[in-house]
């Protein structure tokens, strides 16, 4: 509908770069199958930096890898990133001030000089971060950046630690608290000063970062009863509107579908204290396969995030 010159201008990366610098970018939510060339078996860490999704480490042929790749959400293309100095799987990764901090994933017997490392996207370099062995968590299970400058983590003993790269020497500090509920709650995300995660049987949990006393988000009983109790939530994340986005498997005897829902949140002062209620803003099928749903036949969502592109 336009001339070739105008079309090439509209699709030019220079125009997109100008929009990025002018903060005139548009939020998008990506659901994209990974090509086998870029996949690991499991254990990769995923991070969003600017308009790219980084896939860090993981298992290849049962062994940890140092490989790092990036999916450019503007060009819809994959790029190889300089590998880490250490091979890692099931590591904890977080973004602070545009840098990627990766902790652990290389065994508990490594020394303090190579247990953690930092990637600077502007210089394309990895550097080790010396974290004293006596202060670091044991096998980090979950982590989240709170207040943009501090990382909170829970280790395998349910102990809570915080880490701030601005403090020297860099070390993890025990918060003197334990996670209120046993078991792994995956997919931490921070919305409006509250932490959210997915719980068992289709529930969504929330807590204050200072307390880690998890409570259930109310108001989602109908969705849980209809679709989530049997299959459970497979991935939880947040979008640009500060709403929760969840994914789950569903289907009949002849097909398998990946469903998604967007949930807005409201704080309510109840008689028993603060309560958070959820409202389904949208739900529907986002991916379909002509295979029946079974325990061995499901769509696995590795990572979900809102990316400006």
Image (tube, rainbow, N blue to C red):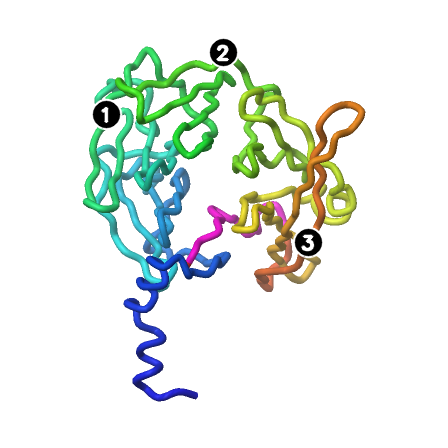
In the picture as drawn, the residue positioned furthest to the front comes out as 22
Query: Spatial distance from mark 2 to mark 1, Cα to Cα?
Result: 26 Å
The residue at the point 77 percent across, 23 percent down is: 272
Q: Does residue 109 sit above or below 84 in this rendering?
A: above
Q: Position of residue 116 (x, y in %)?
A: 28, 27
Judge whether residue 53 can be spotted in this image.
Answer: yes
The residue at the point 44 percent across, 53 percent down is: 307
Callout 3 crowding tier (Cα within 10 Å): few <14, some 14–19, many ≥20: few
Q: Is residue 10 magenta?
A: no
Which mark is first along the chain, 3 or 2? 2
The residue at the point 52 percent across, 37 percent down is: 189
The reply to whether the C-beta atoms of the residues labelled 2 and 3 are less than 8 Å apart is no
Tell me the residue that label 1 is attached to: 114
Q: Position of residue 302 (x, y in %)?
A: 47, 46
Q: Position of residue 287 (x, y in %)?
A: 57, 61
**Res 161 → quadrant:** top left
Query: Spatial distance from mark 2 to mark 3, Cα to Cα?
Result: 38 Å
Tell me the residue that label 2 is attached to: 176
Q: Secondary structure at mark 1?
A: loop
Tell me the residue that label 3 is attached to: 281
Q: What main secondary structure does the magenta stretch of the protein show? A: loop
Which mark is first along the chain, 1 or 3? 1
Q: Does residue 118 sit above or below 26 in this rendering?
A: above
**Quadrant that contains the N terminus:** bottom left
Relative placement, left or right, of 226 versus 77 is right
Judge whether residue 61 can be spotted in this image.
Answer: no
The reply to whether the C-beta atoms of the residues labelled 3 and 1 are less than 8 Å apart is no
> Number of callouts in the render?
3
Q: Secondary structure at mark 2?
A: strand
- What numbered label is drawn on residue 147? none
Q: Which residues are magenta?
A: 294-308
């Amino acid at each position: 509908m336009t001339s070739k010159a105008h079309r090439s201008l509209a699709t030019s990366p220079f125009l997109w770069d100008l929009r990025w610098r002018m903060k005139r970018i548009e939020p998008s939510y990506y659901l994209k199958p990974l090509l086998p060339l870029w996949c690991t078996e499991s254990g990769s860490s995923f991070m969003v930096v600017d308009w790219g999704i980084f896939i860090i480490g993981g298992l290849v042929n049962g062994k940890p890898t140092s490989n790092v790749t990036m999916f450019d959400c503007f060009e819809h293309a994959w790029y190889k990133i300089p590998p880490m100095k250490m091979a890692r799987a099931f590591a904890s990764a977080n973004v602070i001030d545009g840098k990627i901090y990766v902790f652990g994933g290389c065994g508990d017997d490594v020394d303090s000089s190579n247990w953690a490392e930092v990637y600077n996207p502007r210089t394309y370099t990895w550097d080790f971060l010396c974290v004293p062995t006596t202060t670091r968590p044991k096998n980090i299970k979950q982590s989240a950046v709170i207040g943009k400058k501090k990382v909170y983590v829970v280790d395998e003993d349910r102990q809570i630690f915080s880490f701030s790269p601005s403090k020297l020497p860099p070390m993890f500090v025990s918060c003197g608290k334990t996670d209120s509920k046993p078991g792994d709650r995956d997919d931490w995300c921070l919305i409006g000063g509250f932490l959210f995660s997915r719980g068992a049987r289709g529930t969504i949990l929330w807590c204050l970062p200072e307390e880690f006393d998890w409570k259930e988000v109310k108001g989602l009983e109908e969705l849980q009863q209809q679709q989530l109790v049997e299959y459970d939530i497979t991935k939880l994340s947040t979008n640009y509107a500060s709403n929760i986005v969840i994914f789950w498997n569903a289907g009949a005897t002849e097909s398998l579908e990946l469903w998604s829902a967007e949930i807005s949140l409201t704080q309510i002062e109840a008689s028993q204290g603060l309560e958070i209620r959820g409202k389904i803003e949208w739900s529907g099928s986002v991916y379909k396969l002509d295979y029946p749903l079974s325990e061995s036949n499901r769509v696995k969502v590795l990572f979900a995030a809102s990316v400006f592109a």
